[in-house]
Amino acid sequence: MKTKLLFVLLSMFMGITMVNAQPRRGNMSAEDIAKRQTSQTVEALNLNKATSEKLYQINLKYAEKMKEAFADRSSDREAMRDEMMSIRDQKNKELKQLFTKEQFEKYQKHQQEMMQQRRGMRR
């Protein structure tokens, strides 16, 4: 009986430890977010170094804006959603100027795929 209880407690402790060891994306800095977005986009679009550096600067700029908008939770959900969509539209305008037409189309397709994956993970 004692061994079973000890085994159950040890299993619970290990489970809790493993869950807490998982990285939390919600606590990522704007720099980390920009790095992750840039590396994913560079890989998907096979961008050169000059374009990837410009992309990082754009991603960083808008990651900071998104963090600020998300931090201001005093506003209602609808207003926050509208602000985030506005920020995303501004970012897309800058990216459209940075990328070639083909790259921008491929970027949009990649973004749609990523959105589908995130929606699938929530369910």
Image (cartoon, rainbow, N blue to C red):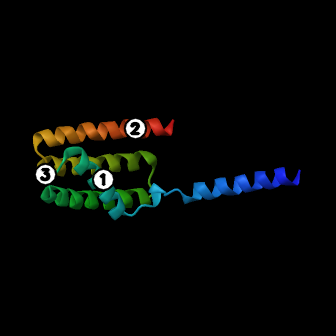
The answer to whether residue 59 is above or below residue 110 is below
**Quadrant of the rendered structure where residue 13 is?**
bottom right
Q: In front of the other: label 2 or label 3?
A: 2
Question: Label 2 belongs to which residue?
Answer: 117
Asked whether 115 or 38 is in front, the reply is 38
Mark 1 or mark 3: name the one nearer the start of the chain: 1
Which of marks 1 and 2 precedes in the sequence? 1
3D distance between C-alphas at marks 1 and 3: 15 Å
The residue drawn where x is 27% and y is 40% is: 110
Residue 37: mark: 1
Three-letter amino acid code at disc 3? Leu
Contact, CB < 8 Å: mark 2 with mark 3?
no
The image position of residue 105, as x and y in percent, is: 18, 38
Image quarter of residue 75? bottom left
Which amino acid type corresponds to the residue marked 2 in the rendered image? Gln
Q: Position of residue 39 (x, y in %)?
A: 28, 54
Categorize mark 1 by other alpha carbons within 10 Å: few (<14), some (14-19), many (20+): some
Does residue 74 show up? Answer: no
* Residue at mark 2 to residue at mark 1: CA–CA distance: 15 Å
4 shown above or below 67: above
Q: Residues within 10 Å of mark 2 (few under 14, many from 20)?
A: few
Q: What amino acid is found at the position of numbered circle 1 in the picture?
A: Gln
> Horizontal placement of 80 versus 98: left or right?
right
Residue located at (13% from left, 59% from top): 50
Q: In the image shown, does 55 or 70 lie closer to the viewer?
A: 55
Q: Is residue 103 left or right of residue 74?
A: left
Q: Residue at x 39, y 50 (%)?
A: 80
As helix, strand or loop, the secondary structure at mark 2 comes to helix
On the picture, is 99 further left or further right than 64?
A: left
- Residue 98's disc is 3
